Amino acid sequence: MTESQNSDRGLTAPSVTRNRDPILAVLRRILPRAGTVLEIASGTGEHAVYFAAALPHLKWQPSDCEEQALSSIAAHRAASGLPNLLAPLTLDASSPEWTVERVDALVAINMVHISPWRATQGLMAGAGRVLTPGGVLYLYGAYKENGAHSAPSNEAFDSDLKRRNPEWGVRDLEEVTELARAHGLVLAERISMPANNLSLIFRR
């Protein structure tokens, strides 16, 4: 993901404008009618602003573990003035303890492949702890299925990720699903998305 700096200190990522509307279409259908949504690895904060504006009935809680991202999220939040967009939390998904006790939904966009596997392990463990009964975990990104890439572009993307960091890479859907199951989360839907990505909806 390529990012650039705005004059207000908020980072921008071109991928956000490409994927935000297809993702929003899924979120409108699967998220609860009220409650709090915790976004893990919010990055620039642009998704948080867009979704909070489109879903005013929900409280949107952005988070990240990097200071630059947290500053960017705060800048975009301040510029938006949205009452339902909460101040960003410092949260490392791989940590055994989160600064959140209970939420109604979790959202993680392009996190699983751009982080070490231990972050996904922590994400699933955390979801098992903080999601309310019937709560939703939404994942978006590229995945392998049955050990194979869905397109040559995803295979090239996987190679590029591993060059950037050997601990990163496109994960196998079955492995992610099995990890989720170990923490009380069941894969309810698999939705094909543009550019060979998937939306995965898990329920507690």
Image (cartoon, rainbow, N blue to C red):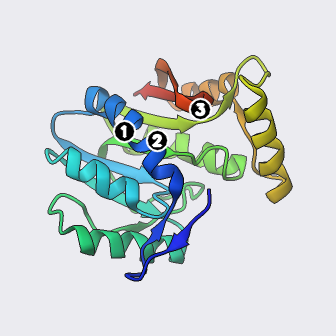
| Residue 98 percent coordinates (x, y) | 45, 59
Residue at 84% x, 44% y: name it. 159
The answer to the question of whether label 2 and label 3 lie on touching residues, with beta carbons closer than 8 A, is: yes
Disc 3: which residue = 195
Count of labels in the image: 3
Give the numbered dot on residue 21: 1
Quarter of the picture containing the N terminus is bottom right
The answer to the question of whether label 1 and label 2 lie on touching residues, with beta carbons closer than 8 A, is: yes
Residue at 53% x, 29% y: name it. 194
Quarter of the picture containing the C terminus is top left
Q: Nearer the viewer, residue 104 or 144?
A: 144
> Is residue 134 at least partly visible in the picture?
no
Alpha-carbon span between mark 1 and mark 3:
13 Å
| Residue 14 percent coordinates (x, y) | 52, 56
Disc 2: which residue = 19
Amino acid of disc 1: Asp
